[in-house]
């Protein structure tokens, strides 16, 4: 009886400790064979995956998922821990690999605990043989005024990553314009034509604002940093240096004057696709998609890729990444986050397959699905 009573006490103590952290504990031995968008998604320890606003890297037969580690409550909307990493061979079952990039205990650091560190994306550089992480960074106590891009590197995909620097991209650089761009669509800082141009010109000396972001590596090894800029009024597509740790000064502006955030990019049959969202704070809104024959544009707006009930709110989520499934043709997963602003750690993941009709795309809701949808 004593041992049984002790077991009950230990069980409830563990339950209280786990609940206090905002985690959901489940059977850690369960194997998953499908995706259930919006549901609790336990890792190998039975804890809901803590990798919000994330992106995936496929490397040597393994997928790595990097995202924001959240804590309970509204406090979790700031970076109290860092960037969490998970690994998987099948995309359904994930192993906790720990914190890849911890925030700093040094209050003077750009990534001091309590800063805002969002949407981490990791790519591999074949020349330097380094893993490079980019993220949106806001300095501690400064709200969203810093609008910086941060970069860190590691010799291993799981880290630890070494923080290098944060800054606003491409100071004193004017945009690149595709051939045929009308002169009246080019920025003229002597006479800004609209609010977006005013923001661009205001930030020209110190570099452009960089908020919600992704990183895309093209077939030729060129890498691009795609981010919300100009007070979120414009997306900028910026070329990264050969080692992926800086900007070259070449960039273009996309969908000027239309508030857009949460960009996610992929390529199919030589055509570039971008999916993003509007700007409504933590509340969901309709997604939007674009195509181009060049990363520098021109990009064509196509409206909302989501269909059916809930499509006007992206089924409650917001885009964060598009994952090409290795070994499968035309297999792309739309990754979105369902934010829980009041209790950040409870944010859910909405992964849905992208369907193609020619060069057009559709995203439809499914309560559950698996990779067999990709023929």
Image (cartoon, helix red, strand yellow):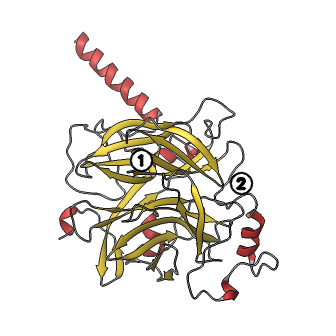
Residue positioned 50% across, 82% down in the render:
301
Q: Earlier in the sequence, mark 1 or mark 2?
A: 1
Nearer to the camera, 49 or 248:
248
- Relative to 231, is 342 on the left or the right? left
Image quadrant for the N terminus? top left
* Relative image position of residue 266 (x, y in whole percent): 39, 68
Residue 145: assigned label: 2
Residue positioned 69% across, 52% down in the render:
146
| Residue situated furthest top in the rendering | 2
* Relative image position of residue 96 (x, y in whole percent): 34, 38
Separation of marks 1 and 2 at Cα, in angstroms? 25 Å
Which residue is tagged 1? 66
- Relative to 162, is 113 on the left or the right? right
Instruction: Tell me the SS state at disc 1.
Output: strand
| Residue situated furthest right in the rendering | 190
Tell me if residue 71 can be seen: yes
Residue positioned 46% across, 34% down in the render:
21
Given contact means CB atoms under 8 Å apart, are the residues at marks 1 and 2 in contact? no
């Amino acid at each position: 009886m004593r041992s049984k009573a002790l077991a009950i006490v230990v069980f409830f103590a563990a339950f209280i400790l786990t609940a206090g952290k905002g985690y959901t504990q489940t059977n850690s031995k369960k194997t998953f064979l499908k995706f259930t968008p919006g549901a609790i998604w336990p890792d190998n320890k039975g804890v809901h995956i803590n990798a919000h606003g994330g992106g995936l890297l496929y490397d040597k037969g393994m997928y790595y998922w990097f995202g924001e580690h959240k804590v309970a409550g509204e406090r979790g909307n700031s970076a109290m821990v860092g960037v969490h990493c998970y690994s998987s061979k099948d995309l359904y079952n994930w192993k906790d690999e720990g914190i890849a990039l911890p925030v700093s205990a040094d209050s003077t650091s750009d990534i001091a605990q309590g800063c805002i560190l969002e949407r981490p994306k990791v790519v591999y550089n074949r020349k330097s043989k380094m893993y490079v992480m980019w993220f949106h960074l806001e300095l501690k106590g400064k709200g969203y005024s810093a609008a910086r891009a941060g970069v860190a590197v590691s010799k291993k995909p799981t880290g630890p990553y070494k923080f290098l620097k944060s800054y606003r991209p491409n100071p004193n650089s004017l945009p690149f314009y595709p051939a045929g761009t009308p002169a009246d669509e080019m920025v003229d800082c002597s006479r800004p034509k609209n609010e977006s141009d005013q923001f661009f010109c205001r930030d020209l000396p110190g570099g452009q604002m960089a908020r919600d972001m992704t990183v895309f590596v093209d077939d030729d090894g060129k890498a691009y940093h795609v981010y919300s800029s100009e007070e979120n009024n414009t997306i900028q597509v910026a070329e990264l240096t050969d080692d992926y740790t800086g900007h070259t000064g070449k960039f273009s502006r996309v969908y000027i004057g239309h508030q857009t955030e949460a960009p996610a990019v992929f390529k199919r049959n030589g055509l570039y696709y971008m999916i993003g969202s509007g700007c409504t704070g933590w509340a969901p809104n309709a997604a939007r998609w674009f195509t181009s024959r060049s990363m520098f544009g021109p990009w064509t707006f196509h409206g909302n890729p989501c269909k059916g009930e809930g499509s006007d709110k992206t089924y409650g989520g917001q885009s964060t990444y598009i994952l090409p499934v290795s070994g499968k043709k035309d297999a792309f997963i739309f990754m979105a986050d369902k934010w829980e602003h009041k209790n950040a750690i409870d944010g859910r993941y909405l992964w849905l397959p992208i369907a193609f009709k020619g060069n057009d795309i559709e995203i439809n809701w499914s309560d559950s699905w698996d990779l067999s949808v990709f023929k």
